[in-house]
Structure formats: structure tokens, C-alpha cells
Image (spheres, rainbow, N blue to C red):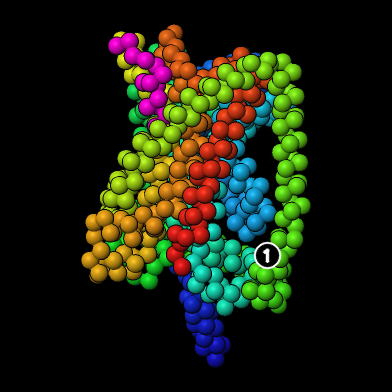
Amino acid sequence: MESVSLNNHKKFTTSIYAKSGLAHWTYPNWWDAIGLCMVLSMFGLLALGAKSMATPYHLGEPIAISLDPSYLPYYAFCSVLRMALALIFSLLFTFIVGTIAAKSQQARRLIIPLIDILQSVPVLGYLSITVVAFIALFPNSILGPECAAIFAIFTAQVWNMTLSFYQSLRSIPHDLQEAASMFHLNGWQRFWKLDVSFAMPGLVWNAMMSMSASWFFVVASEAITVNQQNITLPGIGSYIALAVEKADMHAVFYAISMMFVVILLYDQILFRPLNDWIQKFKFESVDDAEEATSWMVQLFRRTKWLRKCSTIFENGWDYMVNLPATFSSKKTTQSTQSLLIEASERDNSVWWSILLCLLLLGSCYALGFFVFSSVPWQETLHVIFLGSITALRVILVIALSSLLWIPLAVWIGTHPAIARKAQPVIQFLAAFPVNLLYPIVVLAIVHYGLNPNIWTSPLMIFGAQWYIAFNVISGVMVLPKDLCQTASLFKVRGILWWKRLILPGIFPYYVTGAITASGGAWNASIITEVVSWGHTKIKAVGLGAYITEQATVGDFPRLALGIGVMCIYVLVINRFLWRPLYNLATERFRLN
């Protein structure tokens, strides 16, 4: 009798154990072993990076950088770690600031112009200010220069992602908003289930662009030269800077090869799985007949133990998104809440405008007092003239990039198989630091006696065209397939297809890309207007060269003057060109 009872108890326990899914935990397969090794390796590399960022350092102490290619894997890891940390902070900033700008009209009037200004401030401008502050914050530690480098990379990533997220939130279709109201989603749930989900395809593509843009400025962020003080951090950027200084073509070739390997790895390990994951967030009612799955996704799908472990994180995430009473909204209808918000903003709009004007006047007075206490007024006219030359280069770069990439990006985006193959190629080209092209440009200008004011300008395209390419591709890929199939059913082709379907569909994304491309081109001018190879230095006439020169010698009043003039140019262009186009994109060209 006791044996029967014991057997029944064992059967009951085994049944519950099997139903809970825990029985599979004790039988991991070979895929679990491979996946676990990859996860543990990632944590080990993170620990190594954290240890390297906590080593002692005294200002003025040289950090040796070797051109031996055996050091390149370690340098590549250091650079990628800085970019990954900057990408995490950029994502947090995007979620917070982009949401506030999209939801509040008053905050939008401050945040969007401020982003226009900040994205035009060159990396050298941020480094000149922040490196001293971070070194003072973390004295006698390499963490100070590391934080300055991460912050500089952050400034190369964040503005593109924030504007993309903001544009997506402003373009959410009304039927999705009404569905969220019908399901009585509170603000917290609406953010994760509607806002983030709708913006995710464009955000991932712009995160790829931001990661690639980090490589463009990696030399300036890792080989810091401010106030005649040189600080070099271990990384591919400092390796490239030393190779350019020594005119070592072999080292340049090694750097290009390592960058190709690194970009291919993080594309396969991170962005390719993310690109497959975002397919479920597409706004469409027609299933995609061709579903691509990366080898990384397939590997973890074949695991047993790791998949069961992942359910713990999934349940925790679901609980966080669906937090009860703490974030629940009051029993007020969505329309009533919208009316109350609009009325409140109308009542406070005048006072808010007055406050913004006072802040602007105060900032201009403080900047003017700091600059003109040591800089003559006549020099301001010269700096404005330099800004007009750089502005002409920026306009030509945006025009040429648009003519090239709008048709090419539409063709790539309408062919998913080609888009998957082209993605790593575009990422590699976008990540290609322009410093690696210095030997070609310098040797060509010197050998053929070319005009540097003309032939250094094409280098600026490498800092601008990819913003347009990535945004247009993401805009084409998020077009609802039922809309595309309807156009095909009615035989909409040729010019009518471009006029009625493609151009209205990609217009908001193109404007976002053009705004960030404009800021990227202004920022790239500090690198492209002064090129060097070994002891040969070629300087073009322009505002970027002026800022680079003042940052190198440590003349902060003239540096502030150059950055201020650049910000004014960007604000004027954005205010009278890009901002009206952006408002047109969000009000007229949206999926309703």
C-alpha cells in the first residue's frame, strides 16, 4: 500500500515537473554549450574592458600605441566597447528626450532647435569642454579620458536616433492610437506597446547608422589633441592616427582589414538578429512571404536550456511593461486628456516663448562677452565668410547625396534579399574613417597640383550621405505591404508610382536623414578641411579648418566663436528649409 502511494506521488511530481517545462532544463544539448560559451565570453570581455578603464593615469603621461598588427584585436575591442556604451546611453536619451519632444508642444519648441544646435557642434568642441571636466571628475584614473571619448562618440550617435524616434512618434497612424485607447492602455503601456513598437524598425536602422558614424569620428575621440595636450587611448582610432602620422601604408591596410572583420562580427551577432526581430513590428496586414533568419537566431532557437532561461527574462519584461496601479492613468478618456493638454499648452505658450527668448538672449550675451573680450570684431566677419564657404560645401554634399541615394536606397529597400546583402556593405562603407583616405587625397593633390578647396570637399560626403541612405532604406522597408500590393494591383508604375507611393511614403524619413546629414556634414568639416599624411599637411579654406586650428592651439575664445558661427548657420538653414519640410512631412505625409 505504501509502495503504491509512493509510486502515485512520484507520477504526480513527474507530471507537474514535465508540465512546468523544467524537465528540459536537465537535458541541455550541444547548441546550449555553444550558446553558453558565447554568453560567458561576452561577460568575460566586458570584465576585461571594465578592468582596463579603471587603471591609474596621470595627465601628461604618455600611453604607448604600437603599430604592431598583433595589438589590433585588443584595440578593436576597446573601440567597440566605447561605441557600445555610447549606444546604450544614446538609446536611453532617445527614449526620454524623443518622447518628451513628441508629446509636449512646449518642450518640442526647445528640444528640437537645441538638437539642431548640438548636432552641429563638432566633436572637437565637445572634447575641448568635456575632457577637462571628466579628468577633474576622475582624477589619477584613465576613466576620465575614457568618459570624454565615450561622450564624444555619444554625440556622434544620439541626434540621429533621437530625431528618428521623434519622427516615428509624430507619424503614428490614428487607428493605432485609437486601438490603444480602446484597450485602455496607460501612458507606460502605451509607450512600450505602441510608441516603441511602431518606431522600432526605423530606430534599429538608425542605430546601425549611428554605430557606423562612430567609426567616422573614432580618430578624433581616441586621439585627443586639445590645448597642445595629446591624450591617446588604446583603440583603432589612435592606431589610425599614429599610422597617418608615421605615413605607414601597411598599418593603414591592417586597420582597414581589422575594421572589416569587426563590422562583420557585430553585424552578424547584433544587428542581423535585430533586423530579423523587428520584422514583427512592421505596420502591415499582409504577411511577408520571405522570412529571413540569421544564424545567431537559429542557434539560440535550437537550444533547450537557454531558451527556458530566457522565459525568466521575458516574464520579467512583461511584468515591467504591464506594471499595475503604479502607472495607471486616471479614469479620463483619451480625447478629454488631449483637450486638457492642448488647452494648458495654449495658456502657457506666451510665457514659454518669453522664457525661451530670455534664455536665448542670456546665452548670446554670455557667449559674446567671453569671445569678444579677447577677439576683435573684425575677425568675426572673416569667420562668417569661412562659414559661408563651408555652408556651400554642405549644400552641395546634401544635393549630390540625395540625387545618388534616393533612387538607390529605394531600389535596395524594395528588394528585401538585396537589402540583407547590402546592409553589411553599407555599414562598412559608412564606418570607413575618412582619415584612411588621407594618403590618397594628399598624394593626389600634391602630385597633380590640385586645388585643396575643391578636392578635399568630396571627403565630406563620407560623413553625410549614409544618413540619407539608411533613413530612406528604413522608410521603404516600413511601407505597408498591403499598400504596395494595392498599387501593384492597380498597375501603378513609373512616374506615377514614385509620385503617389514612394515619395510620399519616404518623405518623412528622407527629411530626418537630410537634417542629420546636414549636421553630420558640418561636423565632418573639421576632419575634411584639414588633411595630413606624414609631415605633409593640406588645409582648405573653411570654418572646419578654423575650428580645428583653434582647438589644437587651445584658443578657447576663438574656438567658441567658430562653434557659435557654425551653430548659427545650422539654425538658420534648419529654420527656413528643413523645419518647414519636417512639419509638412509629419502633417501631410503620414500613414492614417
Q: Is residue 129 above or below residue 272?
A: above
Q: Quadrant of residue 446?
A: top left
The secondary structure that most of the magenta stretch takes on is: helix
- Say which of 372 and 133 sits in front: 372
Q: x and y percent of residue 559 in the render?
A: 63, 22
- Say which of 396 and 148 sits in front: 396
Q: x and y percent of residue 519 in the render?
A: 51, 37
Residue for badge 1: 342
Q: Which residue is rendered at x = 24% and y = 70% of the image?
A: 489
Q: What residue range appears in magenta? A: 448-461
Q: Is residue 95 above or below residue 132?
A: below
Q: x and y percent of residue 471 in the render?
A: 42, 48
Asked whether residue 455 appears in the rendered view, the answer is yes
Q: Tell me the SS state at disc 1.
A: helix
Q: Amino acid at mark 1?
A: Glu
Q: Which residue is rendered at x = 63% and y = 29% of the image?
A: 564
